[in-house]
Amino acid sequence: MSKVSLFRSVPARAFTARAAAVGLLAVAGGGLLTACGSDDSTATSTPTTTTQAAATTTTGAAPTSEEDAAPSTPPGEGSAATAPAEEPEPVPEGYPGPAEVPVTPEGAAFVEALRGNGIDPAGNGEIAVTTADYICQASAEGQDDTAILVFVTAMVGSDASASGTEITPDKAAADARVYVDTARANYCR
C-alpha cells in the first residue's frame, strides 16, 4: 500500500488559494470580534490636554509671523469652546399645569352614561373621555370595529389599572363594547 497524501491529491494552486481564503476569514473574524468585543461605550477617564509655551526673549524686534504675534490663551478659556453660564428662569406659577385636565360637559355626560352601564372610570374620567375621543375619530375615519375594539380594550385595561382595580381580559373586552356603544350613542357628533 502506498501512502496517499492529502497535499498530493490537491493541486498546489488550489491548496494555496484555500489556505489564503481560510487565513483571510480568520483575520476578518478576529477583527470583528475585536471591534465588537466590548459593549462599554463610555469614557472611563477625563482626557487632559497639555500645551507647551516656547520661551521668548524680548529684543525689541517685532514678531516675524502671525503666529508669534497672536496672543495665547490657556486651554479652557477660549470664547469658542465655552458658553457663558445660563441663569435658570423661574418656574411659572401653576407649572406644569393641573394634575387633572378638566372634563368638558359632554365628557362628563359620557362618564355618567358609562356609570349608568355599570362601568366606573378612574378619577374624573379623563382616560374614558380620551378613549371616547378615539372611538369617535376612528369611527369617522371608517375604521373597522375589530380594530377599534382592540385599542379600546387596551384603554379599558389602562383605566382599570389607573383606578387600582384588576380586570380580566373577558371583562375588558365586554367593557370595551360598552365604551364603543356608549360613545357612539352619547358622545360622538
Image (cartoon, grey):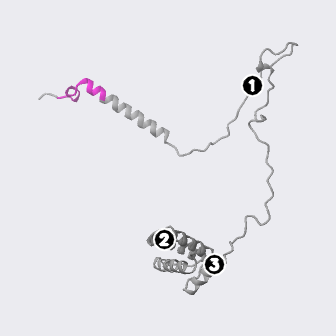
- Which residue shows up at 57% across the image and 80% down it? 186
Q: Residues within 10 Å of mark 1 (few under 14, many from 20)?
A: few
The residue indicated by pointer 1 is 52
Per the model, the C-alpha gap separating discs 3 and 1 is: 74 Å
- Which residue shows up at 67% across the image and 37% down it? 47
Which of the two discs, 3 and 1, sits closer to the camera? 3
Q: How many marks?
A: 3
Amino acid type, callout 1: Gln
Q: Tell me the number on the disc at residue 148.
A: 2
The residue indicated by pointer 3 is 106
Image quadrant for the C terminus?
bottom right
Q: Where's residue 21, x and y in %?
A: 34, 31
Image quadrant for the N terminus?
top left
Which of the 4 quarters of the picture holds residue 99? bottom right
Q: Where's residue 34, x and y in %?
A: 48, 38
Which of the two discs, 2 and 1, sits closer to the camera? 2
Q: Measured along the vertical axis of the image, is residue 109 above or below residue 46?
A: below
Which of the 4 quarters of the picture holds residue 136? bottom right
Name the foreground residue: 155 vs 166: 155
Instruction: Residue lying at the far left in this picture: please name it.
Output: 1
| Secondary structure category for the residue under label 1 | loop
Amino acid type, callout 3: Glu
**Considering only order in the chain, which callout, 1 or 2, is on the residue closer to the N terminus?**
1
| Magenta-colored segment: predominant secondary structure | helix
- Which residue range is magenta in the image? 4-17
Q: Measured along the vertical axis of the image, is residue 73 above or below residue 168?
A: above
Name the foreground residue: 12 vs 126: 126
Q: Where's residue 23, x and y in %?
A: 36, 31
Q: Is residue 180 left or right of residue 164?
A: left
| Secondary structure category for the residue under label 2 | helix
